[in-house]
């Protein structure tokens, strides 16, 4: 017996059978209304609570991550500011050693100059001319009554002449003395100038030190803010990390471009050394060898920068004693130099191979070389120079690489935290949607059984009409 | 976790450093039809050989053989060479190869019969011995086989993994009378090659020789 026949309650009338089934279903659903509502509600609650729990867990994870990010950021910030302060102190130390170490000499020079100036000044001081002793005699003679006596007149004339001559002599002597004093004062000029210069130099040094002190003060303020773990410091450090991330990423892209050029320079001649037909894991051995050389150069560059204490990627190198570090500098530089020389030689070989291939292609295509050839030594020398310079240029990759590695920790942390936040929101949203879906299902359920519900309401209204009126008034 | 990571990192160079056992070299065997009027086409064949010499890389193998009355013989090989892995030496070898082909084109004599099957069998032997990763058999012919009486060639040929490329398949005078002959000839060869495990291709446009190594 097929299912269709089983469902056909009223044979020959499927519509009637269907109506009967609908009535039966509605009645059954009405009877099962309360447990069905409970089941739907409990299912919705389970889903809602599950999603809420998940959202809460994700949010907790996000908070932990944010806390960790902050810690990482602040520790990186502290390290960075410490480095800056250390550098400022080194500068101050250098200024003190360079300029103020000669301060005793400077002081002595200043003292000598002051003594000299003092002596000259004393010598140049104007001595008052001796009081003229004969002035009284002249006055006495002048008071003598002449009474037309020619002798007295003569005497007075003589006295006048003598006085004039005496005056001239005194004036000459005075002028001479003044001239000498002027000369002495003139001689003092260079001493004054030298002293002014010395004082100016001291002033500059002091000003420089003052500026450094102000920078250190600012850094110390920044340092204290980071130590206090303020939000302002965290925000500033995050912004700084993002900037560093993008800038260092851009510089790294440029460096990758340089490495690709370098690779193309040495890949072809490498096939002359390791063979052009051998493969390692699907890659040409020559290409792998060229890549290895470039990577070794980058590694040597990293060690060199680390030994020079420009970067701090490998703490063990930074912690070495100076003697060992200097040895390391020389070793890495020597290896780099050798590799650069090898690259220059390979670049030369590349040019030779390329020329040979070109000649072969021309002979195969039966084309004679026409036109004026470009000076062949220019590309050769250019390639050799590039081959020599690029390894040293790649050395500086260490600086953006360090910035990139350090800032990427922050950027990745911030991104992961944002993703977790969004995930938490999404889970919460799903939880709420599931809860309202439960409500919706209950309403849809009631919609299917609306005839018996309507009847139920009618009966209830007849039984308790006052209750409804009261409820309406209250509402 | 860190231990496993360290172990993987230690093993990686060894795994990576294992020499690749798969051959990446190419082997090309070119059969030149020297029968009758086709001898005049040898200049074109020379251009194709020059293209191949310019395209093949160090470590690749190449041979050129003529198709005559009995081509299943080493005597018909005009020049064969596996190029050195160093580019400079390979270039010298290519020059030598070209010289041999030039000499052959100048002195080639026409053949009364055309034993293409024998040539194909010989080429399979050469390519297998050369250990080439990609095998190409180039047939520069009109594909019309004319055998000496008594020669047996109507058996299935084994060209597993070989790319058989027919070049410059010219239409004969009889093809013009009934083009179905041409299509039947080409179709017979295609069926024969594919039944033998090879890939069949025709390149008639000699301006697009790069199609030889495609597919």
Image (cartoon, coloured by chain):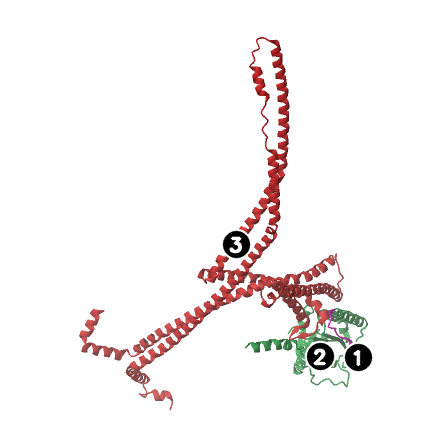
Chain colours: A red, B green
At 72% from the left and 60% from the top, the residue drawn is A380
Q: Secondary structure at mark 3?
A: helix
Separation of marks 2 and 1 at Cα, in angstroms: 21 Å
Q: Residues within 10 Å of mark 3 (few under 14, many from 20)?
A: some
Foreground mark, 2 or 3, reads 3
Q: For the residues tagged 3 and 1, is the chain the same?
A: no
Foreground mark, 2 or 1, reads 2
Magenta residue span:
B75-87
Q: Position of residue B193 (x, y in %)?
A: 67, 80
Between discs 2 and 1, the one toward the N terminus: 1
At 56% from the left and 62% from the top, the residue drawn is A248
Q: Which mark is residue B131?
A: 2
In terms of depth relative to the viewer, which is nearer, B14 or B79?
B14
Separation of marks 3 and 1 at Cα, in angstroms: 90 Å
In terms of depth relative to the viewer, which is nearer, A373 or A38?
A38
At 20% from the left and 69% from the top, the residue drawn is A473
Q: Secondary structure at mark 1?
A: helix
Q: Which mark is residue A215?
A: 3
Foreground mark, 3 or 1, reads 3
Separation of marks 2 and 3 at Cα, in angstroms: 73 Å
Q: Position of residue B45 (x, y in %)?
A: 74, 71
The residue identified by callout 1 is B75
């Amino acid at each position: 017996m097929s299912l269709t026949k089983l469902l056909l309650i009223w044979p020959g009338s499927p519509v009637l059978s269907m109506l009967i089934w609908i009535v039966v279903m509605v009645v059954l659903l009405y009877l099962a209304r309360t447990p069905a509502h409970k089941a739907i509600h409990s299912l919705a609650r389970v889903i809602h609570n599950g999603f809420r729990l998940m959202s809460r867990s994700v949010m907790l994870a996000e908070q932990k991550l944010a806390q960790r990010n902050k810690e990482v950021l602040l520790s990186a910030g502290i390290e960075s500011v410490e480095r800056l302060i250390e550098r400022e102190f080194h500068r101050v130390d250098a200024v003190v050693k360079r300029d103020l170490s000669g301060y005793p000499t400077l002081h002595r020079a200043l003292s000598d100059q002051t003594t000299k100036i003092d002596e000259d000044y004393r010598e140049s001081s104007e001595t008052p001319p001796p009081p003229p002793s004969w002035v009284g005699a002249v006055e006495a003679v002048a008071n003598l009554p002449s009474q037309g006596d020619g002798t007295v007149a003569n005497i007075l004339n003589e006295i006048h002449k003598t006085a004039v001559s005496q005056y001239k002599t005194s004036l000459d002597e005075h002028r001479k003395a003044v001239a000498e004093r002027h000369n002495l004062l003139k001689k003092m000029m260079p001493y004054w100038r030298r002293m002014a210069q010395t004082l100016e130099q001291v002033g500059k040094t002091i000003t420089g030190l003052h500026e450094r002190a102000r920078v250190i003060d600012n850094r110390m303020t920044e340092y204290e803010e980071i130590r206090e773990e303020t939000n302002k410091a965290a925000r500033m450090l995050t912004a700084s990390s993002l900037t560093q991330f993008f800038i260092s990423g851009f510089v790294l892209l440029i460096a990758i471009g340089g490495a690709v050029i370098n690779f193309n320079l040495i890949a072809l001649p490498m096939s002359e050394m390791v063979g052009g037909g051998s493969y390692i894991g699907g890659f040409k051995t020559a290409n792998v060898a060229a890549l290895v050389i470039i990577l070794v150069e980058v590694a040597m560059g990293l060690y060199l920068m680390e030994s020079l204490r420009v970067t701090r990627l490998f703490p063990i190198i930074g912690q070495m004693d100076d003697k060992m570090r200097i040895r390391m500098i020389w070793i890495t530089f020597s290896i780099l130099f050798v590799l650069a020389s090898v690259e220059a030689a390979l670049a030369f070989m590349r040019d030779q191979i390329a020329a040979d291939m070109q000649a072969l292609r021309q002979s195969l295509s039966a084309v004679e070389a026409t036109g004026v050839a470009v000076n062949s030594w220019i590309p050769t020398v250019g390639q050799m120079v590039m081959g020599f310079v690029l390894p040293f240029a790649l050395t500086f990759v260490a600086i953006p690489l360090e910035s990139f590695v350090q800032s990427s920790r922050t950027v990745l942390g911030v991104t992961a935290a944002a993703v977790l936040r969004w995930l938490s929101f999404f889970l919460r949203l799903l939880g709420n949607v599931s809860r309202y879906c439960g409500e919706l299902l209950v309403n849809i359920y009631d919609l299917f059984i609306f005839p018996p519900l309507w009847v139920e309401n009618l009966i209830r209204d007849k039984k308790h009409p006052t209750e409804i009126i009261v409820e309406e008034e209250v509402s | 976790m860190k231990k496993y990571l360290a172990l993987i990192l230690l093993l990686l160079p060894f795994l990576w450093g294992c020499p690749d056992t798969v051959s990446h070299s190419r082997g090309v065997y070119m059969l030149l039809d020297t029968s009758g009027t086709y001898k005049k086409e040898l200049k074109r064949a020379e251009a194709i050989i020059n293209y191949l010499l310019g395209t093949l890389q160090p470590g690749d193998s190449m041979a050129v053989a003529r198709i005559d009355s009995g081509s299943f013989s080493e005597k018909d090989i005009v020049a064969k060479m596996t190029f050195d892995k160093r580019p400079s030496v390979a270039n010298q070898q290519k020059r030598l190869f070209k010289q041999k082909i030039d000499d052959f084109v100048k002195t080639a004599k026409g053949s009364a019969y055309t034993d293409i099957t024998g040539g194909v069998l010989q080429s399979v032997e050469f390519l297998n011995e050369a250990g080439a990763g990609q095998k190409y058999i180039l047939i520069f012919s009109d594909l019309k086989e004319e055998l000496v009486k008594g020669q047996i060639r109507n058996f299935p040929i084994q060209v597993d993994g070989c790319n058989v490329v027919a070049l410059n398949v010219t239409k004969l005078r009889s093809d013009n009378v009934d083009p179905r002959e041409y299509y039947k000839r080409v179709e017979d060869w295609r069926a024969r090659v594919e039944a033998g495990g090879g890939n069949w291709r025709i390149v008639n446009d000699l301006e697009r020789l790069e199609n030889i190594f495609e597919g």
